[in-house]
Image: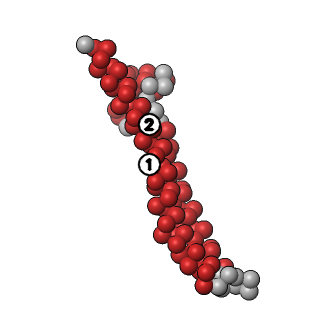
């Protein structure tokens, strides 16, 4: 956090040269994982009720707990990939302009 308060970093942040979206995407990833686990547990728990779907609903909730976070991870990685590509292209541009 101390590196952020250097004058170059604040200027880059205010001029939109430094992206904060990758940090936000990481936070959204953990929220998504928690949401998938909770949704899977709720689905599994409701399978035992009067109007529950039985074994199919129970295993659906189980697979939601296992595969849901993987899907959220893949989606977040694709979003971060766009920002990494942007950073790399910016570095290439800056390297070429210095020559």
Task: Pick whichever, 36 or 74, lies toward us.
Answer: 74
| Residue at 37 percent of width and 28 percent of height | 89
Q: Is the C-beta separation of discs 1 and 2 under 8 Å?
A: no
Q: Which residue is mark 2?
A: 83
| Residue at 65 percent of width and 81 percent of height | 47
Task: Pick whichever, 15 or 70, lies toward us.
Answer: 70
Say how the picture is coloured.
Answer: secondary structure
Q: Percent x, y for residue 51?
A: 74, 83
- Tag count in the figure? 2
The quarter of the displayed image where residue 45 is located: bottom right
Q: Residue furthest left?
A: 99
Local secondary structure at mark 2: helix
Q: Is residue 18 above or below residue 49?
A: above
- Can residue 23 be seen from the camera position used here? no
Residue 59 - label: none
| Residue at 74 percent of width and 86 percent of height | 50
The quarter of the displayed image where residue 64 is located: bottom right
Q: Residue furthest right?
A: 51
Q: CA distance from mark 1 to mark 2?
A: 10 Å
Of the 4 image quadrants, the one containing the N terminus is top left
Q: Which residue is mark 1?
A: 77
Q: Residues within 10 Å of mark 1 (few under 14, many from 20)?
A: some
Q: Is residue 63 above or below residue 73?
A: below
Q: Is residue 20 above or below residue 49?
A: above
The quarter of the displayed image where residue 97 is located: top left
- Can residue 36 be seen from the camera position used here? yes
Local secondary structure at mark 1: helix
Task: Pick whichever, 52 or 8, lies toward us.
Answer: 52
| Residue at 58 percent of width and 75 percent of height | 60
The mark nearer the N terminus, 1 or 2, is 1
Q: Residues within 10 Å of mark 2 (few under 14, many from 20)?
A: some
């Amino acid at each position: 956090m101390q590196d952020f308060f250097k004058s170059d970093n604040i200027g880059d942040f205010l001029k939109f040269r430094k992206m904060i979206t990758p940090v936000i995407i990481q936070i959204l990833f953990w929220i998504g994982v928690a949401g998938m686990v909770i949704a899977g547990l709720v689905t599994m728990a409701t399978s035992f009720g009067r109007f529950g779907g039985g074994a199919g609903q129970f295993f659906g909730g189980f697979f939601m707990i296992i595969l849901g976070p993987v899907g959220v991870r893949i989606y977040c990685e694709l979003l971060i990939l766009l920002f990494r590509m942007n950073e790399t292209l910016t570095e290439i541009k800056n390297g070429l302009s210095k020559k």
